[in-house]
Image (cartoon, rainbow, N blue to C red):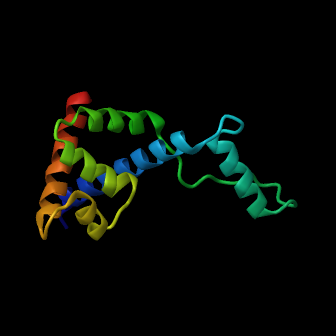
Amino acid sequence: MELDYSTVIDSAFEERMNNWRRTVIYSGKRNSNCTWWAEIYAGLQRLRGPDSDEPPQVINSIDHQDGWQVEAAWRALRDVNEKQVLKYWFIFQYSEHQIKRQMLIRRRGLKELLAKAKNSLQKELNNLA
């Protein structure tokens, strides 16, 4: 049985993009009184109930260093359209229709632009590594 490396690379890239989203979203929406992890911990503790002695497990951890590395690579991209489509797709998680409407893209142009943008971002990430 052969391993399809393109699928492994794609899933690793998608996970990095999800981590980038979590890093950017959590850093911008948190107030100075409580850090994001304390809010998550308190929320999980409330879900578990007051009688539970077990500490809650955080499922989605954030690798901040990698998230900011992806952000630096994204900022290094030169094409504004590539930057916008990556931001709309991964950070805001817009649908294809929303992105087409926002960027005034017709028909099949979105898939090509998104593929080109992913390749450019991957090249920038490789240059930073």
**As drawn, 107 above or below 121:** below
Say whether residue 22 is visible: yes
User: How far from the left and from the top, in percent, is residue 14?
Assistant: 32, 54
Answer left or right for 97 relative to 31: left
Residue at x 47% of width, y 40% of height: 63
Callout count:
0
* Residue 101: quarter of image: bottom left
Q: Quadrant of the N terminus?
A: bottom left
Answer left or right for 51 relative to 123: right
* Residue 38: quarter of image: top right
Viewer-side residue, 85 vs 115: 85
Answer left or right for 74 relative to 15: left
Say whether residue 12 is visible: no
Viewer-side residue, 58 vs 53: 58
The residue lying furthest to the right in this view is: 51
**As drawn, 126 above or below 49:** above
**As drawn, 6 above or below 21:** below
User: How far from the left and from the top, in percent, is residue 22?
Assistant: 47, 48
User: How far from the left and from the top, in percent, is residue 19?
Assistant: 42, 47
Q: Quadrant of the C terminus?
A: top left
Viewer-side residue, 114 vs 40: 114
Residue at x 20% of width, y 30% of height: 127
Residue at x 23% of width, y 57% of height: 103
Viewer-side residue, 67 vs 52: 67
* Residue 79: quarter of image: top left
User: How far from the left and from the top, in percent, is residue 128?
Assistant: 25, 29
